[in-house]
Structures are given as C-alpha cells and as structure tokens.
Amino acid sequence: MSDNNWTKEQLAAISAQGCNLLVAAGAGAGKTAVLVERIIRKITAPENPADLDKLLVMTFTNAAAAEMRERIAQAIAERLEANPANHNIRRQLTLLNKANITTIHSFCLDVIRNNFQSIDLDPGFRISDQTEAELLKIEVLKD
C-alpha cells in the first residue's frame, strides 16, 4: 500500500514513535497492513533501524500471527528485491525466524515458563484442554 492509500488514522498508527502501540479496529479495516507497514518502516529506517527479533508483535489468534509473519516476510522480500545490496534488509529476513510474532496467550505462557521460579510454580506445569478443565471443574464442585 502506498502512502496515498492510508487513512489519517492508519498513517498516525504507522508513524507513531517512542511509544507502544495498540491497533484495534473492526474486521477488514487494515490492521494487519498497518502493523506490517509500521514494522517494515522500523526495521528499514535509514537511521537506527530496529532488529525484527527485538520487536514484540502480538495478535489474538494463531492464524493472525501466521498471516502477520507471512506478510512481513513478503514485505521484506519486496524491499530486498528493490535493494539487493542492503545488508540490513537481508539480515531482517534472517531474523524473521527468531521474531516474536505470537498470540497474547503464547507470549504470556512463555513469560510464565521462563519465570516459573519467581512465581513459585511447578516447572512441569501444563495447560489443560477444555475437556480436561471441565472434568476438573466438576470434580472440584463435587468435593
């Protein structure tokens, strides 16, 4: 999407600096496109570009996270094709595999797994599936 096609609100979200950002809008409003453009601009900035693996990109669903990763890869590939000598862009493509593009739930689970000792949690904990959770709930209510 070229600069001319962004709405005022989208462009504000893309170019906001020095802050964390939450993009919330209805289906089909261009959230993914806005976030991808914001990320691409951050990692390809002429001065002080960010590394892709230093960004945290969270979505609500696994499908959205996969789509985000795919679109970022495509955008990086397009930039690299336009500028094949740019080592930073090539590096960002390599960093994509290590990038933290995930769901909110997966991110929180990683934080817990990496800090279980700080919250006095058994390191062997696991997440139950919905059926198991229902059975446990019934068992607890009976007790």
Image (tube, rainbow, N blue to C red):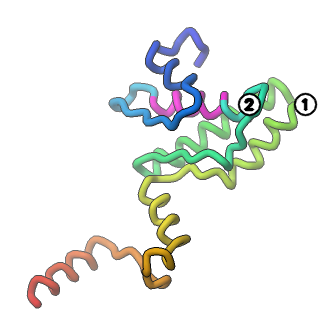
Which residue type carries mark 2?
A: Thr
- In the rendered picture of this protein, how many numbered marks are placed on residues? 2
In the image, farthest residue toward the left: 142
Please tell me whether residue 91 is drawn above or below residue 15 in the rendered image: below
Which residue type carries mark 1?
A: Ala
Label 2 or label 1, whichever comes before in sequence order: 2
Q: Quadrant of the C terminus?
A: bottom left
| Residue 33 included in the magenta stretch of the image | yes
Foreground tag (2 vs 1):
2
- Residue 3 image-quadrant placement: top right
Drawn side of residue 104 relative to residue 130, left or right: right
Q: Secondary structure at mark 2?
A: loop
Looking at the image, which residue is at 44% across and 84% down?
Answer: 122
Residue on which the image places disc 2: 44
Mark-to-mark CA distance, 2 and 1 = 13 Å
In the image, farthest residue toward the bottom: 143
Viewer-proximal residue, 77 or 9?
9
Please tell me whether residue 77 is drawn above or below residue 138 in the rendered image: above
Magenta span of residues:
31-41
Mainly helix, strand or loop, the magenta region? helix
Q: Residue 63 placed where, x, y %? A: 46, 49
| Marks 2 and 1 close (CB-CB < 8 Å) | no
